[in-house]
Amino acid sequence: MKHRFPDHLTSARLLLRRLHRDDAAALCAYRSLPEVARYQSWDAFGPDDAARLIESQLTAEPDIPGTWFQLAIVETATGDFIGDCGLHCPKDNSRQMEIGITLSPRHQSCGYATEAVECLLDYLFGSLDKHRVFASTDVLNRPATALFRRLGFRQEAHLVEHLWFKGQWGSEYLFALLKREWEERYSQKPATPDPAPQQTAPAVSRPGGIGGVGHSARLL
Ligand SMILES: CC(C)(COP(=O)(O)OP(=O)(O)OC[C@H]1O[C@@H](n2cnc3c(N)ncnc32)[C@H](O)[C@@H]1OP(=O)(O)O)[C@@H](O)C(=O)NCCC(=O)NCCS
């Protein structure tokens, strides 16, 4: 076994942890919405899908080539399960990681996705020493493309009508960020105070700061 995921990761307002069996209803509640599924690999997402996904993740680890590792995003203030994010370690390139994220619509547009991905990037470039993190988004998925641009990802490709997706040809952007680019960006950020220390160590958090992929390769 290479790396074991810590108990959780924390940022100013969020906690990222493994999926639990009792997350199924919350996962289903937002993943089944058409606006959430629109650019994702699924059309419908019911209780069986949630149970299958969670079951497949109970013993998963984040750094196993050729596999996805899925995390719950929890709002610390309320304890609410507000979304999930996926880490895909490519089979033939384990120094890289593909990421994806889904938020419940009720929790969109307040910076939670930005904060969750920042927290993940600290973990991926720090604890897992990844060289490159990448994500693909449908070109029509404005919030997702805005998210990766906001985080400083470079747009590396615009793949035009390269895959048949939900009954039509779909186009995608490929976004990527290198470890050195992340470190450079982070070093230029003003320090902000750490969130209050958690009782449930061990955790990984960004020192002094906060802290779906597209449809082509998405497994979970
Ligand atoms: C992709 C997705 C996660 C983006 O979520 P999001 O809510 O737009 O992103 P954030 O949570 O970072 O919020 C950003 C918004 O909050 C605002 N905001 C408020 N406080 C903020 C803060 N502290 N930091 C950053 N943004 C903040 C931003 O200005 C932005 O506003 P806008 O929506 O008017 O542009 C979401 O649209 C989603 O789950 N979609 C369905 C699933 C999907 O398609 N996933 C993509 C797979 S790659």
Image (spheres, helix red, strand yellow):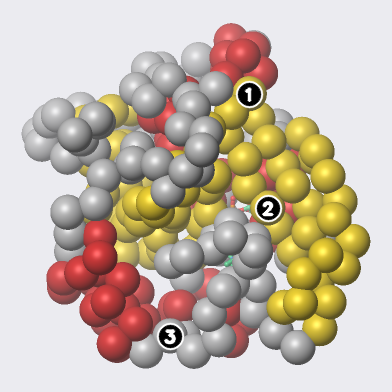
Q: Earlier in the sequence, mark 1 or mark 2?
A: 2
Residue at the image point whose x is 20% and y is 69% from the top: 55
How many neighbours does mark 2 have within 10 angstroms: few (below 14), some (14-19), or many (20 or more)? Answer: many
- Residue 59 as seen in the image, left or right of residue 98: left
> For residue 178, which numbered disc appears in the image?
1
- Where does the image place residue 116, in percent across and percent down from the top left? 46, 44
Q: Amino acid at mark 2?
A: Ser
In the shown orientation, is residue 203 left or right of residue 208? left
Rounded to the nearest angstrom, the CA distance separating label 3 from label 1 is 33 Å
Q: Is residue 92 above or below residue 76?
A: above
Q: Quadrant of residue 213?
A: bottom right
Q: Quadrant of ligand 1?
A: bottom right
Of the residues under marks 3 and 1, which one precedes in the sequence?
3
Give the image quarter of residue 184: top right
Q: Left or right: where does residue 180 sit relative to residue 125?
A: right
Please determine whether, in this image, residue 106 is positioned above or below residue 43. Answer: above
Mark 1 falls on what kind of element? Answer: strand
Depth order, front residue of 29/95: 95
| Badge 1 amino acid | Leu
In this rendering, the answer to whether 33 lies above or below 140 is below
Q: Quadrant of the N terminus?
A: top left
Q: Which residue is mark 3?
A: 45
Side of 195 relative to 183 (left or right):
left
Q: Secondary structure at mark 3?
A: loop
